[in-house]
Amino acid sequence: MADDDGGFEGVRENVDGNPILKLVGYARAYWLRLTTGVLAAFLTRFARLVPPIIVAAAIDRVILSDGEPGLLTAVGLLPAGTITGEAAKLAFLRRLVVIAAIAYLVRSATRFAARYLLQSSAQKIQRDLRNDTYDHLQHLSMDFFANHQTGGMMSILNSDINRLESFLNTEFRQIIRVVATVGGIAAVLYWYSPTLALIALAPVPIIGLASALFLTWIEPRYRGIRQTVGRLNTRLENNLSGAPVIKAFDRYEFEHDRVSAQSQQYHDEKVAALRIRRAFFAALRVLTGVAFVVILYVAGTNFVTTTGSQRMLAGRRLYSPMRRIGRSANKYQLAKSSAERVFGLLGQDPTITDPEDPYRPDSIDGDVEFADVTFGYGDGEPVLRNVSLDVPSGATVGLAGATGAGKSTLLKLVPRFHDVNAGSVSVDGVDVREYTLQSLRDDIAVVEQNPYLFSGTVAENVAYGDRDVLDGEEAGDERARERVQEAASSAQAHEFIQELPDGYDTEIGERGIKLSGGQRQRVAIARALLNDPEIIVFDEATSDVDTETERKIQASVERLVENRTAFVIAHRLSTIRDADTIVVMDDGEIVERGSHDDLLASGGEYADLWAAQADERSISADD
């Protein structure tokens, strides 16, 4: 489900239950290292409780000569009774030093183990989650990409997944810290005084209730922030990609205002959430401060009468982790908002899938039939209406007609980029919906008017047409490079590639920006030819090349498609004049079909288009 602005808020509907529990599901693969890390984290927190107990014991038993045994005496680490005499006090202090040293060693070792195991596990979970999300995104159907913005996809793959990793990496340890510290200190206080322990723990249920209310207040605001971030990322991505257009029309101020408006909205939403968050944290500090004052009075009175330094120092360390509960609740809500988007995307089902019992042919001959095909995008009006066309294997079909007539849409149905609303599209007499997507698309190559090239070298982009060649190109295989050059020569690209600074190893930039439009088209044609398909679709594939280059490409293509089924969409009718059949489309319907000579003789729409282009060529020649 898409949002009106092409965002991803609608994918939240795909999440059943709490998305954080789904995140925990990714942790199951690493349960052993996580369990070990958790145990080490608990030992770290318990070891941190020893030094204040040692200091208190030194004050009570040595400095003040109090006979109260204390916790370390109760567990057998210190001798009982009053410590008198200098030698006894020095021996007692030496034992305290040994205990402290062991505690610090244990703390250092367990701290390393806990942080390494938990943080490395968080990295592994992040890796697995990003890989799964990207893989799932890659398998979604074309209609999903048409309805959702690239900036939003990048926001999920980067910002949201990174936030989940941060939550696992930091807040998970903090939760362990809170549980271990509060539990340990509460046990110590209860051992000394049940009344003091009850007073110390009294704020815990109040903090829990306040945190629950805070999550309720902050959740819609964080959702709004994530949506705004996605829109802002989309705006920035569009503007950076469209920099040449912005410069050409001098729209710097206009785009600055649009980005500023979305930045201001993001600022306002963040400040509003910040106001609630800081007020919540301030209230927690007041609550824990009041509780500490009460403990100070109760324990202080006890200290005056019974010299209970150990319970005073233990109680003081209780409230820092309690205040941390509020920050962890805030981080939890941020993580939950991101998890909803990530697992909502993972819950998005593709609309184009393999059937339950798919057809897997060893090879495809290339017979293509469109039978009463009707198709429209989404809930819109049909773009194609009752289109029927039978194309035998090895035939070349040219498609002509005005922009928006439905030519490109018709051919997108052959590799099942979309499914028909009515009728059928068949290859070799089998409905394309019965094929596996891979077996169908392996034998179909598409070259578009504005082909997409990847950032990388020319050779890598040509090699992309064949898996084995691509692997060989990356491995430096000489035969792979030979096949790349052969395909480039067939597409009339070899000559200009050799003239590039590093030849086939020239980096072409993002989307092939360092190449001209015609050069990009020829590289894309070479990529398609390397695939050695049985069905080839040229969608205005020579629109950006000059007439002489087009003539050379046509000569090569005609030889290469001799035994293949080819569909050629062309604005220049000279490109398709030698096609076996020319189909003229208008408003989603086939209005004419036949050979070039037959269509000219009929004096219909094709003849009018040919005459108009002949006049244009004549005027151009006169100029």
Image: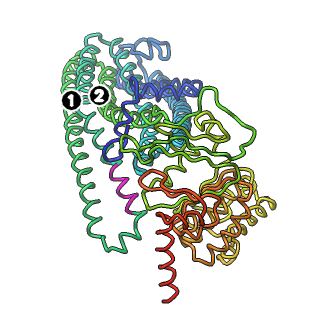
Way the structure is coloured: rainbow
Q: Residue at x 24, y 43 (%)?
A: 274
Q: Residue at x 48, y 89 (%)?
A: 623
Residue 587 in view of the camera: yes
| Front position in the image: 569 or 129 | 569
Decide whether residue 593 is among the magenta residues.
Answer: no
How many numbered markers are drawn? Answer: 2
Q: Which residues are magenta?
A: 231-239
Marking on residue 289: 1
Q: Which residue is mark 2?
A: 319
Query: Contact, CB < 8 Å: mark 1 with mark 2?
Result: yes
| Front position in the image: 147 or 602 | 602
Left or right, residue 488 beside residue 303: right
Pinpoint residue 589: horizontal percent, then vertical percent. 46, 50
Left or right, residue 368 beside residue 263: right
For disc 2, the neighbor class at 10 Å (few under 14, some 14 to 19, many from 20) is: many
The amino acid type, in three-letter code, at marker 2 is Tyr
* Residue 217 image-quadrant placement: top left
Q: Residue at x 64, y 66 (%)?
A: 578
Residue 466 in view of the camera: no
Q: Main secondary structure of the magenta part?
A: helix
* Residue 459 image-quadrant placement: bottom right
In the structure shown, which secondary structural element does the residue marked by tag 1 occupy? helix
